[in-house]
Image: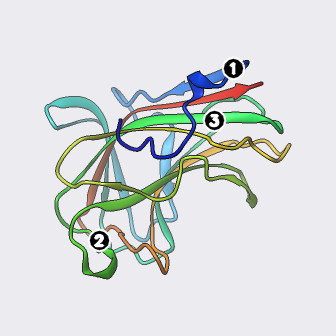
């Protein structure tokens, strides 16, 4: 499955108890997702149709993005309190428009993006358990399935799920005015041993 990378597959880890599951539902609204660090406006549309199916969340940028990150976030998707030893997994589908993206080193193909689960108000309590930047091909639906390779190391609860495109010294695939992304079937799970 695309996006699995070197992560550990959760069902192969013995003794983990499922604490909670968040499953996105964009059929009638944005399901509580809102813009994250966006320059200008990010128009979010529920129940969009792309790649022959409906139920997608559509995001369209109206200005070029130059910040270190631009995307969306959702508060308290699980409602479960994290602890040392907790594990997380996420799966989702993404579709990117074919144009209006800048690319690292003059590339013109895939666009890097990332999911993070963080503590509101503090970047000190984050988990990059969804791997490094994930490259999604433009103009086609791509499915990802990531599982955390290491446990959460803080007793501070994680309560904010973020999805964004990143602009750093090593990755600069960022949306420009008119860039469109679609997300669907986001499933976040929390486990405890």
Q: Are marks 3 and 1 in contact (CB under 8 Å)?
A: no
104 or 27, nearer to the observer:
104
Question: Which class describes the residues within 10 Å of circle 3: few (<14), some (14-19), or many (20+)?
Answer: many
Q: Write down the residue under mark 1.
A: 14
Q: Write down the residue under mark 3.
A: 88
Q: What residue lies at 49% left-to-right and 49% top-to-bottom? A: 34
Q: What colour scheme was applied to this rendering of the protein?
A: rainbow
Q: Write down the residue under mark 2.
A: 176
Query: Count of labels shown?
Result: 3
* Residue 4 picture quarter: top left
Disc with the residue nearer the chain's start (2 vs 1):
1
> Residue 84: x percent and y percent?
83, 39
* Residue 137 picture quarter: bottom left
Q: Is residue 54 left or right of residue 36?
A: left
Q: Nearer the viewer, mark 3 or mark 2?
A: 3
Q: Nearer the viewer, mark 2 or mark 1?
A: 1
Question: Which class describes the residues within 10 Å of circle 2: few (<14), some (14-19), or many (20+)?
Answer: some
Q: Are marks 3 and 2 in contact (CB under 8 Å)?
A: no
Disc with the residue nearer the chain's start (3 vs 2):
3
> Residue 46: x percent and y percent?
32, 36
Q: In the rendered view of the protein, which quadrant contains the C terminus?
A: top right
SS of the residue under disc 2: loop
Q: Is residue 149 left or right of residue 137?
A: right
Q: In the rendered view of the protein, which quadrant contains the N terminus?
A: top left
> Residue 55: x percent and y percent?
29, 29
Question: Which class describes the residues within 10 Å of circle 1: few (<14), some (14-19), or many (20+)?
Answer: few
């Amino acid at each position: 499955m695309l996006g699995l990378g070197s992560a550990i597959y959760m069902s192969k880890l013995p003794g983990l108890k499922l604490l909670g599951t968040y499953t996105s539902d964009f059929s009638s609204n944005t399901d509580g997702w809102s813009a994250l660090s966006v320059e200008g406006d990010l128009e979010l549309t529920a129940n969009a149709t792309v790649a022959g199916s409906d139920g997608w969340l559509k995001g369209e940028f109206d200005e070029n993005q130059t910040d270190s990150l631009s995307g969306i976030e959702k508060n308290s998707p699980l409602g479960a309190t994290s602890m040392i030893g907790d594990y997380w997994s996420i799966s989702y589908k993404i579709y990117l428009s074919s144009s209006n993206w800048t690319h690292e080193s003059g590339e013109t193909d895939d666009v890097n993006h990332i999911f993070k689960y963080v503590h509101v108000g503090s970047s000190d309590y984050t988990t990059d358990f969804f791997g490094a930047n994930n490259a999604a091909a433009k103009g086609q639906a791509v499915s990802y399935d990531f599982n955390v390779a290491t446990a959460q190391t803080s007793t501070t609860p994680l309560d904010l799920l973020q999805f964004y495109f990143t602009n750093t010294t090593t990755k600069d695939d960022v949306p420009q005015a008119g860039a469109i992304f679609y997300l669907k079937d986001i499933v976040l799970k929390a486990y405890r041993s």
